[in-house]
Image (cartoon, rainbow, N blue to C red):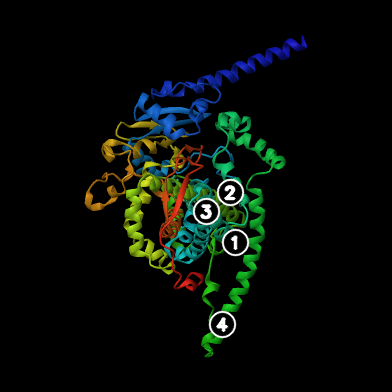
Amino acid sequence: MFLEFFGGIFAVLFVIVYGYFWHRSRFFTRRGIPGPKPTSVFNGNLRELQVNRTPFNSAMLKWEKQYGKTFGYLEGGQKVVCTSDLGILHDVFGRKFENFHSRKPIHVFPFDPDTDERVNVFTSRGLRWKRLRALTSPSFGIPKLRNMQWTMLDTTKKVVELLEDLEGQEINMAKWLLESSTDVIDRIAFGKPECGVGKEQNPVTKIIRAFFDPAPFYENPIINFYSSTFEFQHWTIYFHKILLKFKGSPLTQLAAQLIQTIEEKREKQVKKQEKKKLAEKQFEEGETSALLKKDDEYEDFVDLFLNCEASEEDLKSIEKTQERYGLAKAKIEKRLSDQEIISMCSVLMLAGVDTTATAMSCLCYNLAAHPDAQRTLHAEIDDFIHSEADIHMDNVNNMKYLDWCIKESMRVLPFAAGANSRICMKTCEVGEQKLKMEAGMTIVANVWSIHLDKKLWGEDAEQFIPERWDPDADRLPKDPYAYQPFGLGPRQCMGMKFGLLEIKLMYCHLLKRFEICRNEKTKCDMAGIIVCGPHDVYVTLKRRTPMTYTDKNKLLL
Ligand code: HEM
């Protein structure tokens, strides 16, 4: 009797739960949106999507051929519309942004974007995102970059010096470039005092690799569970928190390191302020040498975030956002809390390291595979760079061909496409065909398809041709949404200028000294679920001109 009673309850519960998931798996069929049939009622199309660890350039391109420009699929419990229709993307990422201010969550870190204290500019939404973005944007501006470039230069220079010993050998440049970009962020966002490249492998690179290229979600029962129960995240999060207590998060170690750095920096800033006041007083009294020395002005991201303060203008724009997005009124803190600084620095490690390293690796492959383009770039570098002192922000930003090569490399291999997504926060219609997007649905830009579209880029769309970026050649598509390696609209990449500068400085050092040559192992296999790039790019470096060190001290300002 007892067993029958509970057996009956279990059977009813099973039917209800299964019925719910079955009903969910038929979502796009009910809406009349074409797309692949879910392979599982529980995790939808997750398996097909990640089977080769290259969601965008395999599954999505295949599905587009089968179902057209706009199709729907289920990523666990997420109802995703994937599209290469630029009209729809204009609405979602630009014109109707107030309805799409949230990004698709990262399964590896399921936490509530509205309440979790670890939220950062990448994972937040609504007012929290607007405030974080407004407060921290100035830290990524040109004046701050001008100051930070010396650290980038120091690291990139050391990497290239170390490569001199490997001249003529088969080198996996992807590993060196990842070490380099990790070191830059480790120094600029985590306060590491000096360059660590060449000493031992930076342990952070392992964390980064594990984060950006996790095992496919369907192989990981925990992530599979979170993805599949996406709509119940408010509850499943508690389970995740308990799990983290036992297992630890890959970022916990980095965060602990940062707490100490923040305390030290705060103390330093107080002392610096006192020193500055004293120096100003002495200066007024006629002691002109008393003003602070230049190196006291160096600021890394921790310094900048400690000093962030919302201006009156920022506050007005945040308040306007409250009204436009129809959000509940909330008190707006003018400064970042310590936890927010930790989260912001951690996100720079996650958003800024693998992306920049992958961009450099893809460029390395493209230059090795296209010796003519490399020759033209060598000629430009020889024109602009005569000694090491010529490698600096103002000079490298004037190098047109270098810029075209980077742009073209990111067009043919848009490795960060997975980040170009939004969640619909308010039901609305998008695009010319008035596609109904319901609150809670996700929209993803099919960037690989857009970047390689022959109608937009011409018959040679799949080829690496830097010259297409020459404005006089008139070969570029008119629609700015045809090119989106850094995303689109108000949530476009914050570190774009930072990343581009780092790539340019690295390649000026590298190509001034070496020719990048193809060897038998040279290939560019794209893999990865979040950032989808090559883990290995084997090339051989051949010595060109030795670098002259006429004004070495300039780099140490
Ligand atoms: C070549 C290198 C890089 C590429 C290709 C890249 C690409 C992207 C993409 C596609 C997005 C999503 C944009 C969107 O949703 O519209 C993004 C967002 C972001 N990126 Fe980058 N990124 C790069 C380097 C960096 C660096 C170096 C940093 C920081 C130092 C950084 C920080 C961020 C942040 C904070 C966001 C979130 C912005 C927001 O949601 O408001 N990125 N990036």
Is the residue marked by circle 3 packed among few (<14), some (14-19), or many (20+) residues within 10 Å? few
Mark pair 2, 3: CA separation = 21 Å
Looking at the image, tell me whether mark 1 or mark 2 is earlier in sequence order.
1
Nearer the observer, 60 or 424: 60
Is the residue marked by circle 4 packed among few (<14), some (14-19), or many (20+) residues within 10 Å? some
Residue occupied by mark 4? 279
Looking at the image, tell me whether mark 4 or mark 2 is earlier in sequence order.
2
Residue occupied by mark 2? 205
CB atoms at circles 2 and 3 under 8 Å apart? no
Residue occupied by mark 1? 191
Q: Position of residue 179 (x, y in %)?
A: 55, 52
Looking at the image, how many numbered discs can be counted on the residues? Answer: 4
4 vs 3, front mark: 3
Nearer the observer, 431 or 152: 152
Q: Position of residue 405 (x, y in %)?
A: 35, 50
Mark pair 3, 1: CA separation = 30 Å
Looking at the image, tell me whether mark 2 or mark 3 is earlier in sequence order.
3
Q: Position of residue 197 (x, y in %)?
A: 57, 57
Q: Look at the picture and state if 36 lies above or below 380.
A: above
Residue occupied by mark 3? 166
Q: Look at the picture and state if 425 lies above or below 323.
A: above
Q: Look at the picture and state if 342 lies above or below 268.
A: above
Mark pair 4, 1: CA separation = 26 Å
